[in-house]
Image: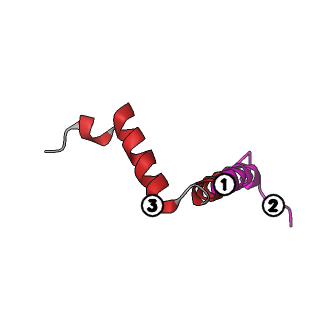
Amino acid sequence: MIQATLLFASGSDIIVIAVLALLLFGGKKIPEFAKGLGQGIRHFKEASEGKSDDAPKDSNTSEKK
């Protein structure tokens, strides 16, 4: 059985993961990954906000012919 505490990383776990990422990818690649992640999140937010704006506000209205 998986305990809920295994799903969350503590402070020391995050430091170890950051050091390993730095060793694996190098100092120049990590900002590029962060930039790409930020752009992806921004596009997702814009798409989700745009989709809610396209939805009809009143479902009882009918189209005129």
Neighbourhood count class around disc 2 (C-alpha, 10 Å): few under 14, some 14–19, many 20 upward: few
Looking at the image, which residue sits at the far right?
Answer: 65
Q: Which residues are magenta?
A: 40-65
Q: Residue at x 67, y 49 (%)?
A: 45
Image coordinates for residue 31, horizontal then vertical, percent: 63, 53
Task: Depth check: give the residue in front, 25 or 47.
Answer: 25
The residue mark sitting in front, 1 or 2, is 1
Q: What residue did someone put label 3 on?
A: 24
- Is residue 18 part of the magenta span, yes or no? no
Q: Residue at x 41, y 39 (%)?
A: 15
Looking at marks 3 and 1 on the same chain, the residue that comes earlier in the sequence is marked by: 3
The residue mark sitting in front, 3 or 1, is 3
Q: Residue at x 86, y 67 (%)?
A: 65
Question: Horizontally, is 51 left or right of 23 in the view?
Answer: right
Image coordinates for residue 60, horizontal then vertical, percent: 71, 48
From what the image shows, is residue 29 above or below residue 4?
Answer: below
Q: Which mark is residue 63?
A: 2
Neighbourhood count class around disc 3 (C-alpha, 10 Å): few under 14, some 14–19, many 20 upward: few
Say what amino acid the circle numbered 2 marks. Answer: Glu
Task: Depth check: give the residue in front, 30 or 51.
Answer: 30
Question: Horizontally, is 25 left or right of 32 in the view?
Answer: left
Say what amino acid the circle numbered 1 marks. Answer: Lys
Image coordinates for residue 57, horizontal then vertical, percent: 74, 45
- Is residue 45 part of the magenta span, yes or no? yes
Q: What residue did someone put label 1 on?
A: 35
Let me know if residue 45 appears in the view: yes
Looking at marks 1 and 2 on the same chain, the residue that comes earlier in the sequence is marked by: 1
| Label 2 residue SS | loop
